Image: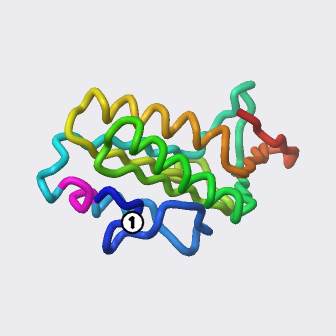
Amino acid sequence: MTESRVIGVPRPGVYRSDELRLEDLLSRLNTFYGSGKSGALALFLGVARAESRNGREVDHLLIEAYEENANAEIEKICREVREKHRAEYVGIWHLEGTFRPGEPVVLVVVAGPHRDRVFEALREGVERYKREPAIFKKEVYRDGSGWWVSE
């Protein structure tokens, strides 16, 4: 599974919320470790929050992406993290669209032979997807005002 593609699993990248359900990917986790080559699998599921960092009540989150850049950057992150940490698989799927609090917006999965490397790779993958791809998030508050969130 050293390729960034696994049969039956969408290529890592940015998808519209009507194109991909992260819950469906979660139901296929055995795809990443079923061969027995990986002794550990870790994941991060990012969920839209009901409260902003400054304590405001969030009505919904709007996520937009410059897909060409975002997909290229996500592919690069997956490849580099996989190679650096000698992981069997690294995948990042980020959704764009409108999300209510409690709805998943991003999934990061890392599978590898040892848990310590898997945890390190997961943390790096999460931190990098928040900074590098052209993905933009706007919190829209209950009063109708909004704020573009930056990491």
Using the rendered view, name the quadrant where residue 8 is placed: bottom left
**Quadrant (top left, top right, bottom left, bottom right) of the N terminus:** bottom left
Q: Give the range drawn in magenta.
A: 29-33
Q: Residue furthest left?
A: 36
In the rendered image, residue 53, in percent from the top left (x then y), is placed at 69, 27
- Return the residue nearer the eye: 129 or 2: 2
Query: Residue at horizontal 20%, vertical 40%?
Result: 113
Tell me which secondary structure the magenta stretch mostly adopts.
helix
Query: Residue at horizontal 70%, vertical 55%?
Result: 63
Give the left or right position of residue 27, taking residue 46 as reference: left
In the rendered image, residue 26, in percent from the top left (x then y), is placed at 34, 57
Task: Say if the magenta span includes residue 32.
Answer: yes
Q: Which amino acid does label 1 sit on?
A: Arg
Q: Name the residue under label 1.
A: 5
Using the rendered view, name the quadrant where residue 122 is placed: top left
- Return the residue nearer the eye: 79 or 71: 79
Up-down relation of residue 59 to residue 11 (above or below): above
Give the left or right position of residue 1, taking residue 145 as reference: left
Give the left or right position of residue 128, taking residue 42 as reference: right
Up-down relation of residue 101 to residue 3 (above or below): above
